[in-house]
Amino acid sequence: MAFTDYYVDPSINANSGTGTIGDPFGDLQYALDSVTRNSTDGDRFNVKSGTSENISSGISVAAYGNGTASAPLIIQGYTSLAGDGGRGVIDGGSSATTIFGNNSCTVHFVDMDLQNTAFDIIEACGQFSHFIGCKISNSGYEGITLNYYGRVFNCEISGFGRYGIYNALYSVIHGNYIECSSGSSGIYLNGSRSEVTKNIVTGNPSNSSILIAGSINNITGNSILANSSTARGIYDGGSLKSYCSIFNNIVEGFSGTGGVGIDLSSNTEASFIDFNASFDNATDYSMGKAIYTSQNEVLTTSGFSKSGSNTYANRFTYFEPVNTGNIHGGAFPDGSRSDKGAIQHQDQSGGGGATVHPLYAN
């Protein structure tokens, strides 16, 4: 993809610059209003780290035009060179706005901190939009609302009022650290046919860490940890409750009154659940009409090392799996020490190794 690069440095005069790395635009909105969109391959706006881009209204693409799947709008942080991992910052100033809300524009946010709105951080975005390596924090409602075919990879999401990620159809939510607070739930699968894999969801949600409201979703290899929560770890509780696959997850800490590790009691059609582990839940499994074998395990000790603090920076250590029960592997984002699912069950025949459901074997 030969997208066109432009540069933005929020530390200089807002309505200035030509967009080169030596003479960057001083403001992202000014940049979007000033360039002609590359309708063939798309454009990347590199936002320099160090000074936040402060906005009082959402980013507008009225003058720029709508990005598409083949020619997206890319907004990415940098420090010295494009794509060097530097982090750009866009701050909503706690105003009743969204940072981005346009369900006709395909947008990719990469290495960006998006923060501080009284409404959603991302209210809507076009199909095939991606969020990669971003920090999404302090929103009144949703952190990210995805359109069809959305992708959220290796992001830190916290401080949201309602849902960390709210998705439509055919999404992939992978390798994220999501911290629930009072009144919120981590991931809301409002649509169907999505993949939710190898995420860490922690904190005490009001409803559930992962809430399923659609059919044919795959929830695999996630590490879910609460603290005496009265909610649920994984809950299939929507109106289209059929044929979901729930494998290789560790769920812990829903030990308050009514708390359930994995709750499929409302499931009106059969979902498939196996090779999960639970610990310290008031009820570990409520199966409903689920199809399962005896491979779902109740642990006698925690499945996580809990070494140090439960923070994004320390997530690989804190959620390191321990050798208890039949656990082997860990739910970590790609690039960590382990890229296995949250739980694998060792071969009970004594032959050694590990067996997992063949659909999800590495």
Image (cartoon, helix red, strand yellow):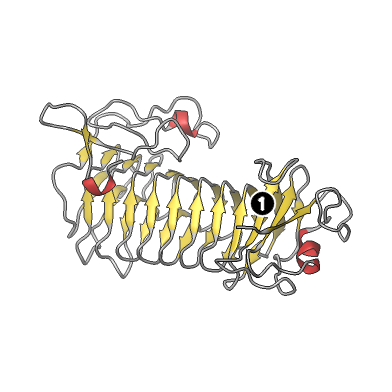
| 306 in relation to 106, above or below | above
Tell me what residue is drawn at x 23 percent, y 41 percent. Answer: 356
Q: Position of residue 329 (x, y in %)?
A: 33, 33
Q: Position of residue 26 (x, y in %)?
A: 84, 55
Q: Secondary structure at mark 1?
A: strand
Q: Is residue 160 visible?
A: no
Tell me what residue is drawn at x 22 percent, y 46 percent. Answer: 358
Quadrant including the N terminus: bottom right
Tell me what residue is drawn at x 67 percent, y 41 percent. Answer: 84
Q: Position of residue 193 (x, y in %)?
A: 35, 63
| 95 in relation to 226, above or below | below
Which quadrant of the figure has residue 32? bottom right
Return the residue nearer the eye: 201 or 334.
334
Q: Position of residue 29 (x, y in %)?
A: 77, 63
* Kind of residue sitting beneath label 1: Gln
Q: Residues within 10 Å of mark 1 (few under 14, many from 20)?
A: many
User: Which residue, as the protein is rendered here, is positioned at the far left?
Assistant: 349
- Residue position marked by numbered label 1 in the rendering: 76
Left or right: residue 197 compared with residue 178:
left
Left or right: residue 342 compared with residue 73:
left
The tally of labels here is: 1
| 304 in relation to 84, above or below | above
Q: Is residue 293 visible?
A: yes
| 201 in relation to 14, above or below | above
Tell me what residue is drawn at x 28 percent, y 43 percent. Answer: 248
